[in-house]
Amino acid sequence: MAKSPETEHPLKAFGWGARDTSGVFSPVKFSRRETGERDVQLKVLYCGICHTDLHMARNDWGFTQYPLIPGHEMVGEVTEIGSKVTKFKVGDKVGVGCLVGSCRQCDQCTNDLENYCSNLIWTYGSVYTDGTLAHGGYSNFIVVDEHFVVRWPENLPIEIGSPLLCAGITTYSPLRYFGLDKPGMNIGVVGLGGLGHVAVKFAKAFGTKVTVISTSINKKKEAIEKLGADSFLVSRDPEEMKAGAGTLDGIIDTVAATHPLLPLISLLKPHGKLVLVGAPDKPLELPVFPLISSRKIIAGSGIGGMKETQEMLDFAAKHNILPDVEIIPIDYVNTAMDRLAKSDVKYRFVIDIAKSLKAE
Ligand code: NAP
Ligand code: ZN
């Protein structure tokens, strides 16, 4: 008979997880593997709540296995290292993002693009190499191969910075890869949530002019005054969208729900690029004529490799790019998820794991 999550491994662990498609979170006991020779064990201190956690908890994408203990934006402190670990020592502050494994041999892996490995292992919800379900950072500690752990820059605050590990790299990577990081370019960011607000900050740090495209007029003042956006379009206002037509070199679309692409394609200049990073559960309608008529590009992008994740963190530390967060205790997680579903957070919830997660 298969072992229960509590007895699969030798180390006792606890966290909060969802047990079924209701997505309701409650305390869960489970177990972790012992620290292997190339593993780092870390005590989780803070963990961000990504919209992916909500999609997965509620089985929006149809492949969730329960119990689901999410969390892929965690900052922690190293408590034990394996005998062959070279990058870290006990006491180091480190981060773990969306990935905990990949084949390490394919073209993607050998080019520092582990995130595009066909055998990648997500931090939670994936089956690990030992056949057990991987569990994420809404938990007291985690054991991760050192290759998938990043060094935490000294001057980056740990309580605020954790969302960079997913929201940061997911927006930094496409801005860089698609050449949307050139000073003076006009860049659009669709959806001012966890990913979107960090996208604005990176795009500004690259010297571009940023237009936020949002459904929430109430985010306008702050987007411009606090986040540094240059302009703001309400996506549901056809007049505003019309006025912005043909102005943008590139757009990062972070929207988590089904939405029309045509108004966004219309905002692009000829040869402009619309990069989708949001992951709605249903296909989006793709209008072809506006692409053909002015050689526009629609692309997708998924997080980033380990090397680029470290580069992004170091860039954020250097340029003082910090997410705007609401720090919450773990027992607030159900309310936080309901609020996240309504885009009612400015702009990322971060769980204070160390202070609030207690063994039940
Ligand atoms: P989030 O904080 O909920 O932000 C999404 C934003 O989209 C909302 O704040 C809202 O912004 C806008 N929005 C929501 N519903 C909308 C609708 N019906 N129509 C138009 N706009 C809507 O979520 P997040 O954590 O940033 O994640 C966003 C998406 O990216 C999720 O689908 C997540 O799974 C995905 N994701 C992908 C990757 C990747 O590697 N590609 C990585 C992480 C997350 P406004 O109020 O401004 O309209
Ligand atoms: Zn995420």
Image (spheres, rainbow, N blue to C red):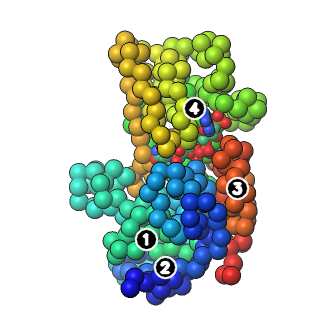
| Residues at circles 3 and 4 in contact by the CB criterion of under 8 Å | no
Q: Earlier in the sequence, mark 2 or mark 3?
A: 2
Disc 4 designates what residue? Answer: 190
Q: CA distance from mark 2 to mark 3?
A: 26 Å
Whether label 4 lies within 8 Å of ligand 1 gets the answer yes
Q: Residues within 10 Å of mark 1 (few under 14, many from 20)?
A: many
Ligand 1 position by quadrant: top right
Binning the other alpha carbons within 10 Å of mark 3 as few (below 14), some (14 to 19) or many (20 upward) gives many
The residue lying at 50 percent from left, 17 percent from top is 266
Give the crowd class for mark 4: few <14, some 14-19, many >=20 residues within 10 Å: many
Q: CA distance from mark 3 to mark 4?
A: 22 Å
258 in relation to 140, above or below: above
Question: In the picture shown, does residue 107 fall above or below 213?
Answer: below
Residue 1 visible from this viewpoint = yes
What residue is rendered at 55% in x and 48% in y? 167
Residue visible at 42% across and 26% down?
286
Residue 165 tag number = none
Whole-percent x, y for residue 105 in the image = 23, 59
Q: How far is mark 1 from mark 4, CA to CA? A: 33 Å
In the drawing, does residue 263 fall left or right of residue 271? right
Mark 1 residue type:
Leu
Q: For mark 1, what is the residue? A: 133
- Residue 259: where, in percent of width, then height? 54, 31
